Image: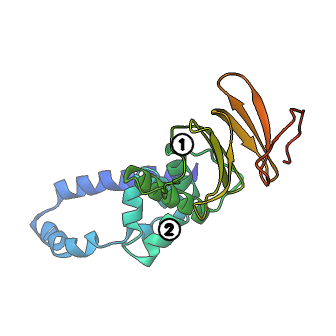
């Protein structure tokens, strides 16, 4: 493609420069030495065609690219616009990429959020923790739905908790619960000695066994 031709041209220029240095005399080398500092300050991302800049950027790791974004507005603009670079960075983190989304800024944000989340997991700061105090024996069963958590314990009780506040909404005396499932009106529990029981939250009463369909 066109960018390969441009790479070939750059390689050719480098070869010519090497030959030129070998063949140069004292005057030419002195001129080069006097102007070398200026030459080294050339901004490649300003001088190179955009597609060639994108190609070269793909060889850099994401952390280096983020550092490059701090060099200048031009570098930040070019690096942030390279979709393939940030898609590849996300793929390397295990993300499944939707190739139809060609928004480089979108994938850069996805990458940065993923890196932040991974750091939080590493530092054990990814989740808030709290304790729900209420049972007097081991908790064997848990079921979560819509901000509510049901717990079944060896203390012969089942409790329904509001996770956001940590408050116990209902508490029912049951058998030892090996499994629990609930909706806003009812609770079904399963015990280690095989019986399945159906309870009403509002009254705490155990109802007659029946086939019951839960609210979705």
Task: Answer whether residue 52 is visible to the viewer in this image.
Answer: no
* Front in this rendered view, residue 204 or 189: 204
Mark 1: which secondary structure?
Answer: loop
Q: CA distance from mark 2 to mark 1?
A: 25 Å
Looking at the image, residue 200 sits to the left or right of residue 152; the answer is right
Residue at 89 percent across and 33 percent down: it is: 210
Q: Nearer the viewer, residue 59 or 6?
A: 59
Relative side of 136 to 148, left or right? left
Residue 152 in view (yes/no): yes
Give the farthest residue toward the left.
Answer: 26
Q: Which residue in the structure is indicated by mark 1?
A: 94
> Looking at the image, is 70 positioned above or below residue 200?
below
The residue sitting at 68% across, 28% down in the picture is 191
- When the figure is inspected, residue 110 is found, relative to residue 98, above or below; the finding is below
Residue matched to label 2: 78
Crowd tier of the residue under label 2, counting other residues whose Cα lies within 10 Å: few below 14, some 14–19, many 20 or above: some
Q: Nearer the viewer, residue 76 or 9?
A: 76
Which element type, helix, strand or loop, lies under badge 2? helix
Quadrant of the rendered structure where residue 64 is? bottom left
Quarter occupied by residue 119: bottom left
């Amino acid at each position: 493609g066109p960018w390969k031709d441009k790479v070939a041209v750059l390689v050719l220029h480098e070869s010519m420069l090497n030959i030129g240095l070998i063949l140069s005399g004292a005057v030419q080398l002195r001129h080069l030495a006097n102007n070398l500092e200026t030459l080294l300050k050339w901004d490649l991302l300003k001088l190179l065609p955009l597609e060639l800049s994108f190609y070269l950027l793909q060889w850099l790791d994401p952390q280096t690219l983020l550092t490059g974004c701090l060099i200048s507005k031009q570098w930040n603009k070019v690096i942030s616009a390279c979709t393939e670079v940030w898609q590849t960075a996300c793929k390397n983190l295990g993300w499944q990429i939707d190739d139809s989304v060609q928004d480089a800024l979108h994938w850069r944000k996805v990458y940065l959020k993923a890196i932040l989340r991974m750091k939080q997991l590493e530092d054990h700061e990814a989740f808030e923790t709290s304790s729900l105090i209420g049972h007097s024996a081991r908790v064997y069963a848990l079921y979560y739905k819509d901000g509510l958590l049901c717990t079944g314990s060896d203390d012969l009780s089942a409790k329904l908790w509001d996770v956001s506040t940590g408050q116990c909404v209902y508490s029912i005396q049951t058998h030892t619960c090996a499994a629990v499932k609930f909706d806003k009106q009812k609770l079904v529990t399963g015990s280690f000695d095989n019986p399945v029981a159906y309870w009403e939250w509002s009254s705490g009463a155990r109802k007659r066994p029946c086939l019951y369909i839960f609210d979705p």
